[in-house]
Image (cartoon, helix red, strand yellow):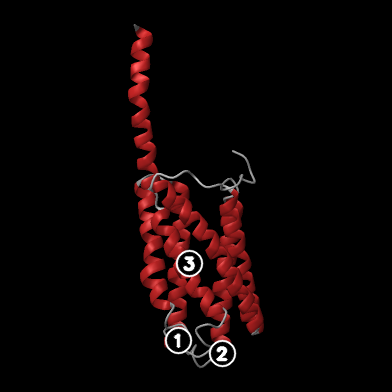
């Protein structure tokens, strides 16, 4: 009798477990955070490779995307992660909220002279950009090292972001459009990794199986 009861309980528990798993896959902050990250990355990549031109108005098409799509999207994903108790995604999306919004603010302020004569003083503008890029390069390298327990796809993403920041920093410091162009290509590369991560998240949310993410470099 007890065996039948146990089997009956297990039979009823299985659908519940499946429903809970489906609900968990659907309640994934990456569904908002990752695609908005990708969209901002594409806009940045287009700017770096010169698609938007080299004039003072080249940033006009990118800034609304960074403020109203990527920045807000990362913030929503951060709050969502906190609400469901997902600490690691909250940290990652929170960091990138700061990156994208501060980058958009920097680019706007340089063009509008909010913090000094940056639009007419090249040395001041270059120094501001170098400070920004070096600070964020250090920050994302720290994130990369701290996240080595995550699946390898995330490590690849963060390493590519590190590489892009370094290339853009060197290109900005030296005035090399070639380095900036290569940095833009690397931006497109990490955007593609983001597309893969989004396909995985949306696929699971709609009933699909998880896509391969690779083994973590540091085991749990």
Q: Quadrant of the N terminus?
A: top left
Q: Residues within 10 Å of mark 1 (few under 14, many from 20)?
A: some
Report if the CB atoms under discs 3 and 2 are less than 8 Å apart: no
Q: Is residue 7 visible?
A: yes
Q: Find the distance from the CA under tag 3 to the CA under tag 2.
A: 23 Å
**In the rendered image, the vertical position of residue 78 relative to residue 207, given as above or below:** below
Name the residue tied to disc 3: 99
Q: Which mark is residue 39?
A: none
Give the mark nearer the N terminus: 3 vs 2.
3
Q: Nearer the viewer, mark 3 or mark 2?
A: 3
Left or right of 53 on screen, residue 160? right
Q: Position of residue 25 (x, y in %)?
A: 40, 44
Residue 65 in the image: state x and y as whole percent. 40, 73
Q: Tell me, yes or no, whether the two marked residues, 1 and 3, touch with CB atoms within 8 Å.
A: no
Can you tell which mark lies on residue 122?
A: 2
Q: CA distance from mark 2 to mark 1?
A: 11 Å
The spot of residue 195 in percent (x, y) is: 50, 60
SS type, badge 1: helix
Residue at x-position 40% and y-position 67% = 71
Q: Earlier in the sequence, mark 2 or mark 1?
A: 1
User: First in sequence: mark 1 or mark 3?
Assistant: 3
Mark 2 Cα within 10 Å, few/some/many (few <14, many 20+)?
few
Quarter that holds the C terminus:
top right
- Per the image, the residue denoted by label 1 is 111
């Amino acid at each position: 009798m007890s065996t039948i009861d146990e089997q009956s309980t297990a039979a009823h528990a299985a659908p519940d477990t499946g429903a809970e798993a489906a609900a968990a896959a659907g309640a994934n902050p990456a569904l908002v955070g990752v695609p908005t990250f990708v969209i901002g990355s594409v806009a940045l990549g287009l700017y770096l490779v010169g698609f938007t031109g080299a004039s003072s108005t080249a940033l006009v098409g990118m800034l609304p995307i960074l403020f109203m799509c990527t920045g807000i999207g990362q913030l929503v994903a951060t709050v969502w992660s906190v609400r469901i108790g997902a600490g690691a995604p909250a940290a990652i999306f929170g960091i990138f909220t700061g990156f994208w919004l501060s980058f958009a603010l920097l680019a706007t302020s340089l063009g509008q002279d909010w913090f000094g004569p940056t639009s007419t003083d090249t040395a001041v503008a270059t120094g501001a950009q170098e400070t920004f890029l070096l600070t964020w390069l250090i920050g994302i390298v720290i994130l990369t090292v701290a996240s080595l327990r995550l699946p390898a796809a995330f490590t690849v993403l963060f390493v590519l972001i590190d590489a892009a920041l370094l290339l853009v920093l060197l290109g900005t410091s030296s005035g090399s459009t070639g380095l900036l162009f290569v940095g833009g290509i690397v931006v497109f590369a990490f955007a593609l990794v983001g597309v893969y991560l989004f396909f995985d998240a949306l696929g699971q949310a709609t009933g699909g199986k998880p896509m391969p993410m690779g083994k973590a470099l540091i085991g749990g």
